[in-house]
Image (cartoon, helix red, strand yellow):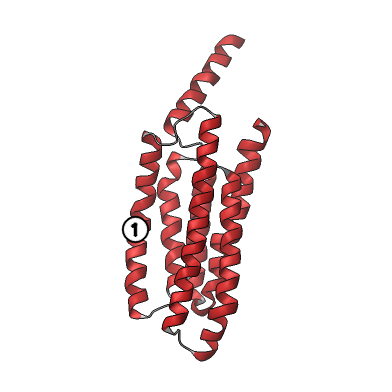
């Protein structure tokens, strides 16, 4: 009987590995969160604070914000990709497989749609709406892709959507909700994933 239970556990683990992307590293989300907080603080102190006082964003302000956001995005993608590759290699798994591609597809649909819509509003000069929109579309992307990875990603996605809606209510304080969503939320849920799934296996 004991052997049968062990066999069932092994079969369940194999099915879980084959149907879900488990190479996501919790610490990489923490790194992404720290990068977002730093980027958000830099954006606020160098651009947003003064722009809110003046009532408008100059072309230089927009250029600075785009560079700042792109830097945060590059750091986050690099951290998540590298750590996922290391984790997959340590578990003797391929990083690119059917599950990864499905997760990437489900993640990219809302992200690409949101990016196009944000670009339209940015072109029109509607800067204030960008924080809630990026949070909401990112949250929807996480919820959409969460069925292929840890359940905590679904909760993270819901958190991002809620913060995005709050940012839409308090429109001119969007930078603070942006820092909470892309910064603090990533650190919290990244830590949860790490301590729940990874620290005990070392």
Percent position (x, y) of residue 135?
47, 63
**46 lies above or below 3:** below
Q: Quadrant of the N terminus?
A: top right
State the residue position of label 1.
Answer: 112
Task: For mark 1, give the secondary structure.
Answer: helix
User: In the displayed structure, does residue 79 sit left or right of residue 58?
Assistant: right
- Between 155 and 101, the residue placed more toward the observer is 101
Residue drawn at the location 50% of the way across and 63% of the way down: 71
Q: Quadrant of residue 138?
A: bottom left
In the shown orientation, is residue 202 left or right of residue 120? right
The image shows residue 202 at horizontal and vertical percentages of 67, 32
Q: Is residue 65 visible?
A: yes
Q: Position of residue 171 (x, y in %)?
A: 49, 77
Q: Is residue 1 visible?
A: no
Check the image and report above or below for 170 versus 85: below
Residue 44 is drawn in which quadrant? bottom right
The image position of residue 55, as x and y in percent, is 48, 89
**Figure label count:** 1
């Amino acid at each position: 009987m004991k052997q049968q239970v062990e066999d069932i556990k092994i079969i369940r683990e194999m099915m879980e590995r084959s149907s879900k992307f488990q190479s996501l590293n919790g610490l990489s989300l923490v790194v992404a969160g720290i990068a977002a907080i730093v980027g958000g603080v830099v954006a606020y102190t160098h651009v947003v604070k003064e722009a809110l006082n003046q009532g408008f964003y100059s072309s230089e302000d927009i250029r600075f914000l785009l560079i700042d956001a792109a830097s945060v995005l590059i750091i986050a993608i690099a951290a998540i990709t590298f750590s996922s590759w290391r984790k997959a290699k340590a578990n003797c798994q391929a990083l690119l497989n059917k599950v990864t591609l499905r997760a990437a597809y489900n993640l990219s649909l809302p992200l690409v749609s949101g990016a196009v819509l944000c670009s339209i509003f940015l072109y029109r000069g509607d800067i204030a709406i960008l924080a809630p929109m990026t949070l909401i579309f990112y949250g929807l992307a996480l919820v959409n892709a969460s069925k292929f990875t840890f359940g905590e990603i679904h909760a993270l996605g819901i958190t991002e959507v809620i913060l995005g809606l709050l940012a839409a209510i308090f429109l001119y304080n969007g930078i603070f909700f942006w820092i909470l969503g892309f910064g603090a939320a990533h650190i919290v849920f990244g830590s949860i994933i790490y301590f729940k799934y990874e620290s005990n296996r070392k």
